Image: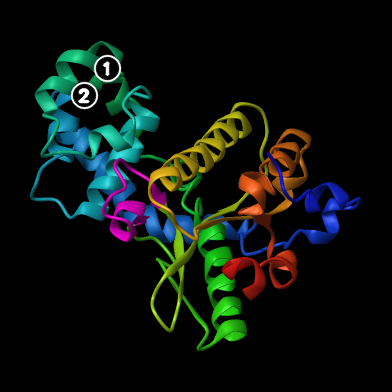
């Protein structure tokens, strides 16, 4: 049951959103991407020219002798140009998944080597720029979330100084598992940050940070289920291991104002008798207080 319907009182949601504008715009982004991927594109063309089959291209790309960054760039190109069903998360696991098994299971989807040779022999400058844009399309994914987390950490440390500590990765890094904080907790429960009281290091809150540039449909549905599940797991654990634990959902960005995403935030906020709060950066000072953390 909700113990706090604060978000329901907000009539202009846009006023509580923090715009983070760090995305490089077109066409400026093309020069950055061609500088990043230009050499890998040239190498991709060379590998195709030297290979006897599309499977052979994959074998050469997944070589353990290659630098990991170079291999990832080539795998992105392989997915875009040869076999879209081979996602990079699968193909990058060179020690867990053999190239032979990938060829056996997905080889029928590979573009023929004869066609690849024709297309990538003397690749034009325009095509190189286009390919760099395709494989670099999602390079900034997650960066806005990292910036939001860092901003929140800076704000928290400035406001609470010696009263409370905040721990967790500011950028890419391993999440904090709830079982690290409470050894009796069974299962996976990754958190983006944890707040402790300085005096005795007692855990007072764990949090989850997300920045949504845009959101809706199935993505929002997935988020809704995941957040609700976090609350239910924490409640279930608290029933047999009493804690002071509060849950903070740091949610920000223009995507938050979308109807389904905003409604989910309103439903989530105030659950567990007020021990759950959804905040944006502009709401943090009013909603993340010693009274609430200690209550």
Residue 160 on the magenta segment? no
Q: Under tag 2, what secondary structure?
A: helix
Q: Residues within 10 Å of mark 2 (few under 14, many from 20)?
A: many
Quarter that holds the N terminus: top right
Q: Under tag 1, what secondary structure?
A: loop
Q: Is residue 210 visible?
A: yes
**Circles 2, 1 touching at the beta carbon (< 8 Å):** yes
Q: Nearer the viewer, residue 184 or 117?
A: 184
- Residue 17 in the image: x percent, y percent? 76, 58
> Where does the magenta region start and end?
175-190
Is 12 above or below relative to 292? Answer: above
- Residue 133 in the image: x percent, y percent? 50, 46
Q: Which mark is residue 54?
A: 2
**Residue shown at 39% from the left, 45% from the top:** 240
**Residue shown at 61% from the left, 60% from the top:** 24
Residue 185 on the magenta segment? yes
Residue 84 placement, left or right of 139: left
Q: Nearer the viewer, residue 39 or 180?
A: 180
Residue 243 placement, left or right of 87: right
Quarter of the figure with residue 116: top left
Read off the residue under disc 1.
112
Lower sequence index among marks 2 and 1: 2
- Residue at the far right: name it: 11
Is 152 above or below relative to 212? Answer: below
- Residue 73 in the image: x percent, y percent? 31, 47
Residue 206 placement, left or right of 82: right
Quarter that holds the C terminus: bottom right
Is 179 above or below relative to 104? Answer: below
């Amino acid at each position: 049951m909700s113990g706090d319907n604060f978000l329901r009182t907000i009539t202009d949601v846009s006023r509580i959103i923090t715009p983070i504008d760090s995305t490089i715009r077109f066409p400026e982004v093309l020069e950055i991407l061609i500088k990043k991927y230009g050499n890998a594109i040239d190498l991709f063309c060379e590998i195709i020219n030297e290979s006897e089959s599309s499977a052979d291209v994959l074998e050469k790309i997944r070589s353990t002798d290659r630098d990991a960054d170079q291999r990832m760039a080539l795998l992105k190109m392989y997915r875009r140009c040869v076999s879209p069903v081979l996602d990079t998360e699968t193909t990058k696991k060179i020690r867990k998944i053999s190239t032979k098994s990938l060829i056996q299971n997905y080889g029928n989807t590979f573009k023929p080597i004869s066609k690849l040779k024709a297309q990538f022999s003397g690749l034009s400058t325009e095509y190189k720029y286009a390919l760099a844009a395709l494989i670099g399309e999602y390079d900034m994914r997650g960066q806005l979330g990292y910036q939001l987390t860092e901003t929140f950490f800076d704000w928290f440390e400035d406001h609470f100084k010696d009263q409370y500590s905040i721990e967790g990765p500011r950028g890419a890094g391993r999440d904090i598992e709830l079982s690290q904080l409470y050894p009796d907790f069974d299962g996976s429960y990754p958190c983006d940050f944890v707040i402790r009281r300085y005096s005795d290091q007692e855990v007072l809150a764990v949090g989850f940070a997300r920045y949504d540039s845009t959101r809706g449909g199935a993505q929002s549905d997935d988020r809704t289920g995941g957040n609700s599940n976090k609350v239910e797991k924490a409640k279930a654990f608290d029933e047999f291991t009493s804690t002071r634990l509060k849950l903070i959902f740091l949610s920000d960005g223009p995507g938050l104002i979308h109807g389904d995403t905003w409604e989910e935030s309103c439903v989530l906020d105030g659950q567990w008798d007020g021990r759950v709060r959804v905040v944006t950066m502009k709401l943090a000072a009013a909603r993340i207080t010693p009274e609430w953390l200690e209550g």
